[in-house]
Amino acid sequence: MRLILVPMAVASLLIGCNGHKNKKEGDSTSKSEDAISYTDEALMDSVQYQTFNYFWEGAEPVSGLARERFHMDNEYPNHDKDIITTGGSGFGLMAILVGVERKFITREQALERYEKIVDFLEKADRFHGAWPHWLLPSGKVTPFSPKDNGGDLVETAFLVQGLLTVKEYFKDGNEREQKLAQKIQELWEGVEWDWYTKGGEDVLYWHWSPEYGWEMNFPVGGYNECLIMYVLAAASPTHSINKSVYEKGWALDGAIAKDTTYYGLETELNHFEHDDAPVGPLFWAHYSYLGLDPKGLTDQFGDYWKLNTNHAMIHYKYAVDNPDGYEGYGEDCWGLTSSYSIKGYAGHRPGEDLGVISPTAALSSMPYTPKESTQFLRYMYTRQDSLIGKYGPYDAFSLEKDWYLPRYLAIDQGPIPVMIENHRSGLLWKLFMANEEVKNGLTKLGFDSPYLKNDD
């Protein structure tokens, strides 16, 4: 029944708002009947169903992978809608598992889609085992930027995080499911993480191109969204990195631990190597942690649950404080991250605030700030429902500028169903953290986690 009831619930949530409602208008009537009639569970079901469907019904049809973007207005200023994003596809792989567990689709439907995806990835362009940021439906690379036409190790890490989670879900299943798991293992083993140390340096590089080599010159130091790349690079059974690459490259010889305090909360790690800004955009608390469970996760540099919880709560407190006086900001409307913006695309965060709220920021923070994120969810679906479309909340909006576009980005929609599910059941965390090679990688880098203590 849920497959029917969830879309009906979504439809009923969307009825009755033809114009753009702002917070000021909503305040005049206090809480509407809708705001109190829908349970938290029904609201979470609805947003999970819609955002899952971006990766199911909205997928690129040839590959089954995620489109980089989907514009409901059918206007694509830069690229057409069939550009495939590898990192966003990794998020989508996990979102499809949410769809199975929430009974939006069957296990057999998911298996068929995963087989299509894996067959495509086996044949798609790879560069020392790493997939590019963007692929065409032909499987050929298309440049993300002029010199970015080769391997993208960060996007590959996001893709592999999703693949390994799928592998854990199916590895003990029937013969067909076990075959899928084995194919995923072969893809994982093919990624040459150590190649991306550029000849043995103690750091991982983001890009390599057969045409431009290392010219993009982007060594990845923390803290940002890329922790999962270092964990997987250490975990690789075939092309593993040394611990020194993590300690000297990612952790900057310990400088990553030089935190600060903002809105009364410790940032736990130094968010910016070359900047005094206290915190980054909120996607940093999401991308690496779709599978990597931060609960109880610590190493010599920090406590990752504290890191992410404080990061999200700082964004919330910042919106409540609202130092720039933007329309709508407050307890119900908060969350800054990289997303579409009034002029193109922007990395919104405290200190770089354009008055633009990105729904993925608060919604994907649900495990860290359940009360505050649920307030935002209820606000969106009962008081700002003109900002919600077929695949969930639109990518970004500004009540200050009375602006939004009916457009979606895979990397913003994907974390929503996954992180809400981690809040509700821990599904994706349990699967990914069950992988023995991942646990080996965490141990190698000196991490401690409850998942590493259950192997007696």
Image (cartoon, rainbow, N blue to C red):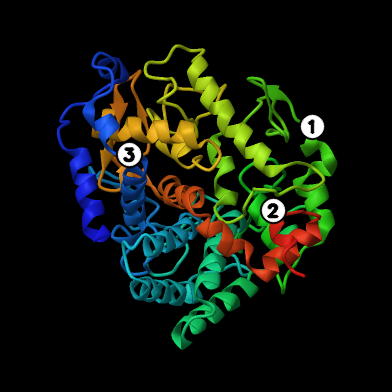
N-terminal of the two: label 3 or label 2? 2
Percent position of residue 343, x then y: 39, 29
Q: Amino acid at mark 2?
A: Tyr
Q: Quadrant of the C terminus?
A: bottom right
Specify whether 21 is left or right of 444.
left
Q: Which residue is mark 1?
A: 258
Tell me the element at label 3. Answer: loop
Marks 1 & 3, CB-CB < 8 Å contact:
no
Q: Nearer the viewer, mark 2 or mark 1?
A: 1
Q: Secondary structure at mark 1?
A: loop
Q: CA distance from mark 1 to mark 3?
A: 36 Å
Indicate the amino acid at tag 1: Lys
Quick one: label 1 or label 3, which is nearer the N terminus?
A: 1
Q: Which residue is mark 3?
A: 394
Amino acid type, residue under disc 3 in the picture: Tyr
Q: Nearer the viewer, residue 283 or 455?
A: 455
How far apart in space, not on screen, are marks 2 and 1 (Cα)?
Answer: 23 Å
Q: Residue at x 46, y 85 (%)?
A: 174
Quarter of the image where the N terminus is located: bottom left
Horizontal side of 259 relative to 57 (left or right) equals right
- Image mark count: 3
Which of the pair 349/294 is nearer the observer? 294
Q: Quadrant of residue 240?
A: bottom right
Residue at 59%, 76% in the rendered image: 185
Question: Which residue matches tag 2?
Answer: 205
Between 136 and 214, the residue placed more toward the observer is: 136
Return the x and y of residue 22 as percentages of the image width and height.
28, 21
Q: Are marks 2 and 1 in contact (CB under 8 Å)?
A: no
Q: Residue 261: horizontal and vertical position, in percent?
A: 71, 23
Give the CA separation, mark 3 to mark 2.
Answer: 33 Å
Label 3 Cα crowd, 10 Å radius (few <14 / some 14-19 / many 20+): many
